[in-house]
Image (tube, helix red, strand yellow):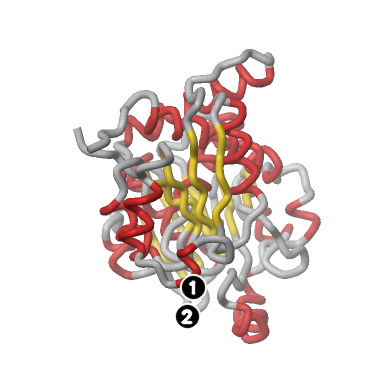
C-alpha cells in the first residue's frame, strides 16, 4: 500500500469527503464531552511554514496534542530549507523522523515534489493554488447548520484564488452548484473550472451570482505575496464587497463564510461578518475538528508504508 497524501480535495472520494465531515462532527462532540481519545500517542507531525498563520498552526498543534502526539514547527529561518537544501533531500530526512508532514507554502509544485520523496503522508495546509483543509471546515460548518450541501447553491465572491479553486473541487465532489463572481482578469484557472463545468458558473456580477444562493463565501482581496497589488485591487474589487444588500438577494436562511483573517470594510462589511447569518467563528473552530479527522484518516485508518 503506497503512502497516501492530501494535496487537494481530489485526493478524497465523494464518500470519503462526507465520511470525514461526519467524523469531524463526532470528534467535536467527543471533545466537548471531555472524552479522552489519543490514537496518535507518540506520533509526531512536522509542520513546515513558509507562510505565516494563526488558525492553521494552532489547529494542527492542538489536534496533535489532543490526539496524544506532538508537533514540531519548522520555518525556513530555522531549517536548511531556507538555506537552499533541495526539497527532495528535506523530504527524505523529515519523513524518516516524523509520522506526517504538513506544509503551508506558496508554490503548489514544491508541495507535490516534497510528497513524491516523502515516505509519510503530506498534508497541504495552503498553497497559492489550493486550500483544501479550509474546505473541510467549511463543509462541516454547513452540515452542522443546514445539513447536506448536495443540491444547494454556493456563491463565491471576489478573487479566483486558492480558496475558489478548492470550492470548485468541493462542488464537484459534494454535488452543489457554485456561482463564481470575479473581476475581469481575476477568474479562477480555466482548467480547474473546466474540470467541474457541469456544476460551476463564472459570472461578472456578484448580484447575479448570489440570487437564490444558500451560502455566500468571500476572502481577502490581496493574499500573502500580493501586497504590492493591494492598492490596485482595492479599486478593482470594490464592486465585489459582500454587503447587506448582496446578502438580501440570497435565500433568507443563507449563511456567510470567510476563512479569515477578514478586512471589514473591504471584502465584507462589518454588518455581515458580525451579523446573524455569519458562521465564521464556528467555521474557524472547525479547522481543529476536520484536521483531527484528516489526521486520523491518514495515520490511523491507513498506516503509511516505511521503506
The residue wearing badge 1 is 204
Q: Is residue 122 left or right of residue 46?
A: left
Q: Residue 1 location in percent, x, y?
A: 19, 32
- Label 2 or label 1, whichever lies nearer to me, is 2
> Which residue: 34% across, 41% down?
120
* Residue 245 is at least partly visible in this image: yes
Please rate how many residues cluster around mark 2, counting C-alpha atoms within 10 Å: few if below 14, some from 14 to 19, many from 20.
few
Relative to 135, residue 268 above or below: below
Q: Is residue 198 above or below residue 99?
A: below
Helix or strand or loop: what does disc 2 sit on? loop
> Which of 72 and 20 lies nearest the eye of the viewer?
72
For the C terminus, the image quarter is top left
Q: Position of residue 130 (x, y in %)?
A: 43, 58
Mark 2–mark 1 distance (CA, rounded to whole Å): 7 Å
Q: Is residue 207 visible?
A: no
Q: Residue at x 58, y 54 (%)?
A: 217
Q: Secondary structure at mark 1?
A: loop
| Residue visible at 30% across and 55% down in the picture | 196
Circles 2 and 1, Cβ within 8 Å, touching? The answer is: yes
**Mark 1, other Cα within 10 Å: few <14 / some 14–19 / many ≥20:** some
Direction left: furthest residue: 1
- Residue where numbered disc 2 is placed: 184
32 shown above or below 213: above
Relative side of 200 to 245, left or right: left
| Residue at x 61% of width, y 15% of height | 36
The spot of residue 284 in percent (x, y) is 65, 43
Task: Give residue 266's quadrant in the image.
Answer: bottom right
- 12 or 57: nearer the viewer: 57
Amino acid at each position: 500500500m503506497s503512502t497516501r497524501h492530501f494535496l487537494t480535495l481530489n485526493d478524497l472520494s465523494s464518500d470519503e469527503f462526507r465520511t470525514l465531515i461526519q467524523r469531524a462532527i463526532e470528534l467535536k462532540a467527543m471533545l466537548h464531552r471531555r472524552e479522552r481519545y489519543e490514537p496518535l500517542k507518540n506520533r509526531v507531525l512536522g509542520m513546515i511554514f513558509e507562510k505565516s498563520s494563526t488558525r492553521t498552526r494552532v489547529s494542527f498543534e492542538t489536534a496533535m496534542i489532543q490526539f496524544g502526539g506532538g508537533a514540531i514547527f519548522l520555518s525556513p529561518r530555522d531549517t536548511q530549507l531556507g538555506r537552499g537544501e533541495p526539497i527532495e533531500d528535506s523530504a527524505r530526512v523529515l519523513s524518516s523522523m516524523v509520522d506526517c508532514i504538513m506544509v503551508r507554502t506558496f508554490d503548489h509544485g514544491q508541495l507535490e515534489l516534497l510528497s513524491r520523496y516523502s515516505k509519510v503522508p503530506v498534508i497541504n495546509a495552503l498553497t497559492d493554488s489550493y486550500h483544501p483543509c479550509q474546505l473541510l471546515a467549511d463543509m462541516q460548518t454547513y452540515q452542522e447548520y443546514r445539513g447536506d450541501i448536495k443540491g444547494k447553491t454556493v456563491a463565491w465572491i471576489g478573487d479566483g484564488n486558492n480558496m475558489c479553486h478548492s470550492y470548485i473541487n468541493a462542488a464537484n465532489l459534494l454535488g452543489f452548484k457554485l456561482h463564481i463572481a470575479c473581476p475581469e482578469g481575476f477568474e479562477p484557472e480555466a482548467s480547474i473550472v473546466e474540470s467541474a463545468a457541469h456544476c460551476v458558473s463564472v459570472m461578472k456580477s456578484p448580484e447575479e451570482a448570489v440570487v437564490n444562493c444558500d451560502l455566500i463565501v468571500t476572502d481577502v482581496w490581496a493574499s500573502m505575496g500580493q501586497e504590492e497589488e493591494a492598492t490596485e485591487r482595492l479599486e478593482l474589487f470594490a464592486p465585489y464587497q459582500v454587503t447587506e444588500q448582496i446578502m438580501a438577494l440570497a435565500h433568507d436562511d443563507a449563511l456567510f463564510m470567510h476563512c479569515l483573517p477578514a478586512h471589514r470594510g473591504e471584502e465584507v462589511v462589518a454588518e455581515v461578518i458580525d451579523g446573524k447569518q455569519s458562521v465564521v467563528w464556528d467555521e474557524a473552530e472547525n479547522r481543529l475538528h476536520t484536521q483531527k479527522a484528516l489526521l486520523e484518516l491518514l495515520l490511523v485508518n491507513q498506516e503509511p508504508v516505511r521503506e
